[in-house]
Image: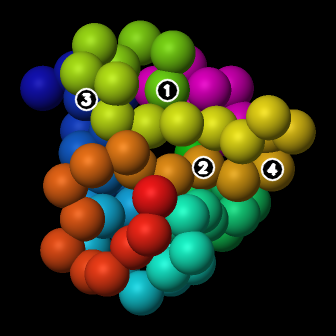
Amino acid sequence: MNNLVAISRKLAYLLRHTQHINPKGGWMDVHVAMSTLSISRDTLEQIVALDSKGRYQLSEDGAYIRALYGHSVDVEL
C-alpha cells in the first residue's frame, strides 16, 4: 500500500472517530494531527490535495483540518 494512502486512512480515522475534534465544526488543530500521525505539514497538505473523494478540508488560515463526512461522533458541520 502506498504510504500516503496508509497515512490518509489513519487521518480519516483520527478526524472521524476520535474525541480529539471540536464538536462545533469538527475541526482539529493541524499540529495535533501532524504530531499524532508523525507527519510533516507538507505530507498533510499533500494528502488533502490528492484526496479524490474530498474527505478533508483545511481552514482558510491553514491552522485546522476536518473530515467532511463519515463521522461516528457527534459533529456539527
Kind of residue sitting beneath label 4:
Ala
Whether the magenta-drawn stretch holds residue 41 is answered as yes
x%, y% of residue 74? 31, 81
x%, y% of residue 26? 50, 65
Q: Residues within 10 Å of mark 3 (few under 14, many from 20)?
A: few
Kind of residue sitting beneath label 3:
Val
The residue at the point 50 percent across, 80 percent down is 23
Kind of residue sitting beneath label 1:
Val
Q: Nearer the viewer, residue 31 or 66?
A: 66
Label 1 close to label 2 by CB (< 8 Å): yes
Q: CA distance from mark 2 to mark 4?
A: 7 Å
Q: Which residue is mark 4?
A: 63
Q: CA distance from mark 1 to mark 3?
A: 11 Å
Q: Which residue is mark 1?
A: 48
Comparing marks 1 and 3, which lies closer to the viewer? 1
Q: Which region is colored magenta? A: 40-47
Label 2 close to label 3 by CB (< 8 Å): no
The residue at the point 64 percent across, 38 percent down is 58
Q: Earlier in the sequence, mark 4 or mark 1?
A: 1
Q: Nearer the viewer, residue 4 or 61?
A: 61
